[in-house]
Image: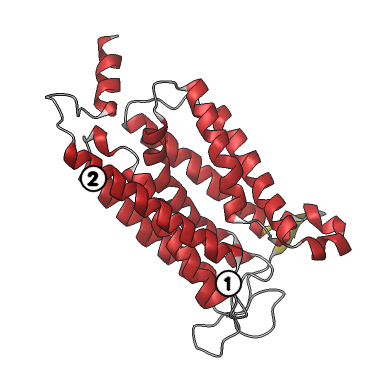
């Protein structure tokens, strides 16, 4: 399959398909998170301003970390630092900047929403958006493929010679699987306040595992261990450790009648009383 054009023209205006993909992904993430907040009784009117800052900090963080990690290249051609339409956004950088922004803004604009509960509601949205973003982002950008391959599954990507492993498609499939697991865990722990944060922890751990295998199997061109592989394993360990700790604590705590009420139920009930 020949590469999808990475840009097209509407009159004198050049439109980059990568940028359109990012915009659609952010729009999907916003609408889906708003729906989940509404469904769980928190409302979503406050989310608009928060999401603007999430998008800005995610892009800035993702680009900054990528530039730092590839400083030698950008030092030789500094004008490319701002050319995000050619790709070059590091996922961990985006999370590093966007997550604190989201937490601080949510605490200010929706104080009744606890951090752990917000993380549980947002985690499936993040991984679903990541799955969509792989299809509408790297799959449509310059040099979006993985290692060279002669296999029938190989695809042609702009800026790369020969067939490449279609890593964005693999990542979309992986993240869809993680998303389904996250929803299954959410159903399993629903109504158990002692298990707040488990959905986010499981999602983060599994996503970290997929990032490790993506780099190790399909993207890294040597046998060395790179930073993304290490960070992926750190996320797996942290998510697993938190999940084990919460489950162990929940088993050893005696919950009085009504103490385990889901925070969502309490919020909805309070809203009805008003």
Q: Is residue 54 left or right of residue 248?
A: right
Say if residue 235 shows up in the picture: yes
Placement of the C terminus among the 4 image quadrants: top left
Q: Single out the residue that lies furthest toward the front.
A: 252
Relative height, residue 38 to residue 15 (above, below): above
* Numbered disc 1: secondary structure: loop
Indicate the secondary structure of the residue bearing disc 2.
Answer: helix
**Disc ID at residue 261:** none
Across and down, in percent, residue 235 comes to 46, 55
- Which residue is the site of mark 2? 248
Q: Is residue 11 visible?
A: no
Residue pictured at 79% horizontal, 52% vertical = 82
Q: Quadrant of the N terminus?
A: bottom right
Q: CA distance from mark 1 to mark 2?
A: 33 Å
Mark number displayed over residue 225? 1
- Report whether 200 appears left or right of 1: left
Q: Is residue 112 above or below residue 62?
A: above
Residue at 74% over, 63% down: 70
The image quadrant of residue 79 is bottom right
Residue found 50% across the figure and 77% down from its top: 217
In the depicted structure, whether residue 81 falls above or below residue 72? above
């Amino acid at each position: 399959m020949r590469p999808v054009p990475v840009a097209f023209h509407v009159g004198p205006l050049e439109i980059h398909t990568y940028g359109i993909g990012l915009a659609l992904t952010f729009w999907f993430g916003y609408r889906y998170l708003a729906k989940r907040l509404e469904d769980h009784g928190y409302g979503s009117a406050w989310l608009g301003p928060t999401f603007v800052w999430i998008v800005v900090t995610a892009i800035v963080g993702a680009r900054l970390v990528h530039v730092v990690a590839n400083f030698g290249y950008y030092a030789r051609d500094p004008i490319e630092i701002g050319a995000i339409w050619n790709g070059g956004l590091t996922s961990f950088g985006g999370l590093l900047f966007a997550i604190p922004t989201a937490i601080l803004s949510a605490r200010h604009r929706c104080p009744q929403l606890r951090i752990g509960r917000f993380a549980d509601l947002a985690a499936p949205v993040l991984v679903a958006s990541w799955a969509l973003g792989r299809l509408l982002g790297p799959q449509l950008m310059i040099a979006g493929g993985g290692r060279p391959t002669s296999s029938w599954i190989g695809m042609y990507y702009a800026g790369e010679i020969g067939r490449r492993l279609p890593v964005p498609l693999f990542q979309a499939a992986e993240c869809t699987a993680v998303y389904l697991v996250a929803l299954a865990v959410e159903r399993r722990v629903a109504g158990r306040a002692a298990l707040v944060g488990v959905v986010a922890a499981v999602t983060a751990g599994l996503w970290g595992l997929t990032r490790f295998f993506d780099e190790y199997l399909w993207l890294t061109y040597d046998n060395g261990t790179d930073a993304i592989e290490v960070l992926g394993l750190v996320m797996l360990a942290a998510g697993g450790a938190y999940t084990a700790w919460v489950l162990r604590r929940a088993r050893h705590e005696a919950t009085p009648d009504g103490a385990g009420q889901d925070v969502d139920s309490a919020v909805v009930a309070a809203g009805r009383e008003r």
